[in-house]
Amino acid sequence: MSLEDVSLGDRRLEGVAITGIGLSCALGDGARQVWRAIRAGDSGIAPTRRLDVSTLSCRYAGEVAEVASSHPRLRGRVDRATSLALTAAEEAVAAAGLPMEGEDPYRMGVAVGTSVGGLDRGERFHWELLREGAEEPRADLLYNYPLYTSADALSIAFQFKGPKVVISNACAAGSNSIGFAADAIREGRADVMIAGGVDVLDILSLAGFDSLNALDSEPCAPYSRSTGLNLGEGAAILVLESESFARRRGADILSYVLGYALTSDAYHATAPDPAGAGANRAMRAGLAQAALGPAQVDYVNGHGTGTPTNDSAETKAVDALFEGLPAAPMSSTKSQVGHMLGAAGAMEAAACVMALRDGVLPPTVNVDESVELGRDIVPNRSRPQDLNVVVSNSFAFGGNNCSLVLGRRPSPSHERAEGRVVITGAGPVTSIGSGRRTFLDALKEGRTGVGSARLTDLSRSRTKLAAEVDTADCRRHVDRAYARRLDQIGLLTLAASRLALDDAGLRITKAASDRIGMVFGTFSGPVETVEQLSETIGTKGPHRVNPRLFPNSVMNAAAGHACLALQLRGPLSTLATGCAAGLSGLGYAADLIRRGEADVMLAVSADELTPLLHYGFDRVGLLAEDAPRPYSASPTGAVLGAGSTALVVESLEHALARGATILAEVKGHALTSDGYRIAGNDPSGDAWAESFRRALADAGMPASAIGTVFGDARGSAALDRAEAAAVAQVWEPGSVRLANLSPYTGHVPSTSALMAAVCATETLRTGWSPQIPAPERFLDGVDGYVAASGQPDGRACVLTAANWGGTYASLVLAPWTTDGASEQIATAGEAA
């Protein structure tokens, strides 16, 4: 294979067209019905019926009337969120007239934003355990509990096998998912993405917001009364296509994604920066990406929750955007459908698309027009207006800001950025030690962190093995006063981030903080905090929820805390695509730098270990009773571990300018999906192998340029066999060495791959990689990879991660030298 064989071809950025919309929310099912209700000024906010809120202060919500419990595209029952997402996606795909045959499925992907997902299934499992004991909870409830379930279902239903991601930036997740999907298209990794968000009303969310006194006792009135919010539920899915793909097939283009931007407030765990500085930077950066200015904005669809802090901060941000200019009208769709959490940004983007199409301003309803308004919030009734450019804002807990820029016409075409991206620091927090050198020394000594649990009560589990991290050690790296605010995952995240920054010798200054951000990946997020809240609700009632705990219950809370503690104000995103989240986050961070959105990003992943989490894994039969044996012909299961890892990722120019030590270069990455089944993986390994090939193509390298593959096998039969099959499709036995960390650190779901990245930086430097302990018998064919010789000089490494449910991430790390790593690798590949 030559470099030409794996090249991505055209290096110009693709325009991103929107060609289909699917909606289900409190205003009805179907985009046509919902848009008609929005234009009429209707409100779907009404007394809550499905959940018992009698002990809470607010009785209103934006509820979906009917949701199917099964779906024709999937076998068996599905959770409420998955059903809503499937229904909306079917409408969007049909409206777009997407061709389902004859196209490359690996160029069609899925991006979903969510905060709650199948949480109600997890709550039922937990409450059954509390009421009935360890033998009674139904294991099947856990298959639909993870946040990534709805994304897996969409991939299966439509057989989209390209990039798949789940984003959980709380209330900014839906808009961030659309931005991520647009990136995948613009960067040439996909032709089509179905993107949006889904969330359902859940008692934990209602109780939590109620504990913060954030809910309105009446239907909310953003930007006018501003006395609180109403929660809502539903799904909003958009079909995004490359402009060339849409025009080639004669699609009806509704509008275009012109740009988007992410920022961090670094101000407070729940409250926005009162000056609106982070929100203002997000809007300006999104417009700059689209080569537009504030004077060209015709309408702002605001975040507009109805809480006094949000409404005040956002209006200040918008006023600052239009300073010296006539302010564009701004309205809040949440006044009609409620706050749909992870789906909110996608719902509002859909409303903007229809507003652009029809030349209509959506209203803010429930406005008392007898009171003088300080700005045009399109009170109570929609009205016609020519629209060419709109901004849609989403601002979330943890200071996460995302602004989308949509337009009737495409942006001017411009060259894809070709900046180089390097890793300059690493901060692993693991069961065998913390800090890069300590971790690597422990691996070289063959030390393992797997053993009988000492810190975690595993009395409910069949197996007592775990790879634990003592969070007391994390506190050594965290300011004592700040540590009191943090739960387990917060401590892990901040400790790893500080270790990585110290390792990189990077000091964050106020002047540079806007250009330094974070992408955070996690498998199950703050499960310790969620467990505590769930137990309170199940045993004492929702009105007894602790308001100090609730802000830490969202998936992005740990990242928000870290950005606040470190004063990072650049792009901020949280990925929750299960075991693929950490490595996907590293790829996303590299892309943001390569495009010039940041100079430095922290790519961080963290996973907790709690008694309930361990019991859940054991209940579905995934855990081993003895040492983990990856690639064994007789697999016994995984050993669950805790830990975190942060990598400092920089533009090459920034690293060289400050004289940083460069550990590795990020050359390319890819995401694929097998579309096989919920919680299952295709044993053929075809989609996994495709992630290898596409990562190599993105890196511009032949397979022969790779010396070591860091695998994600964990002692689980289906995944281990699929990985072995995937490796064999791309590399001949003996041509690469296979390495794996699970015998040493346990399986730390989203974090194992970033721990492997730390190890890979040493492999690139010295050729060493950790040995895989030999089981009684390896899987057929694996021996040739395990026994391969050490890493030859100049060869690159591939890192890979796989999630239950069929998401695969692969990323290429190469050595960096002053005379150019690419030439060195190409020469090594030709010699091989």
Image (tube, rainbow, N blue to C red):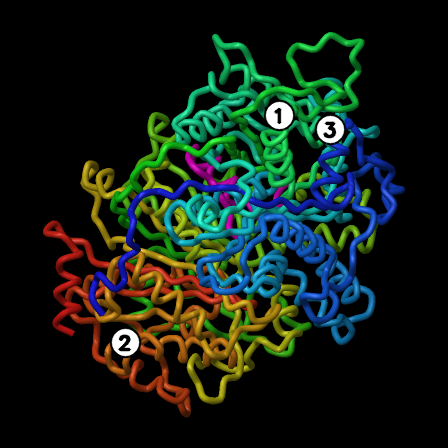
Residue range corresponding to the magenta coloring = 551-575
Lateral position of residue 249 relative to residue 680, left or right:
left
Give the number of the disc on residue 737.
2
Q: Secondary structure at mark 2?
A: strand
Lateral position of residue 660 relative to residue 771, left or right:
left
Give the Cα separation between the discs numbered 1 and 2.
59 Å
Residue identified by numbered label 1: 359
Give the Cα separation between the discs numbered 1 and 3.
11 Å
Q: In the rendering, at what x and y percent does residue 784 appear?
A: 29, 85
Tell whether label 2 touches label 3 (CB within 8 Å).
no
Q: In the rendering, at what x and y percent does residue 201 appear?
A: 75, 46
Q: Is 571 inside the magenta-drawn segment?
A: yes
Q: Earlier in the sequence, mark 3 or mark 2?
A: 3
Q: Is residue 16 above or below residue 158?
A: above
Q: In this rendering, which labeled residue sits more in front, label 1 or label 3?
A: 1
Which residue is rendered at x = 56% and y = 31% of the image?
392
Which residue is rendered at x = 31% and y = 65% of the image?
798
Residue identified by numbered label 3: 39
Density class for disc 3 (Cα within 10 Å; few <14, some 14-19, many ≥20) is some
Q: Amino acid at mark 3?
A: Arg
Which residue is rendered at x = 51% and y = 26% of the image?
389
Q: Is residue 438 above or below residue 459?
A: above
Give the Cα separation between the discs numbered 3 and 2.
61 Å
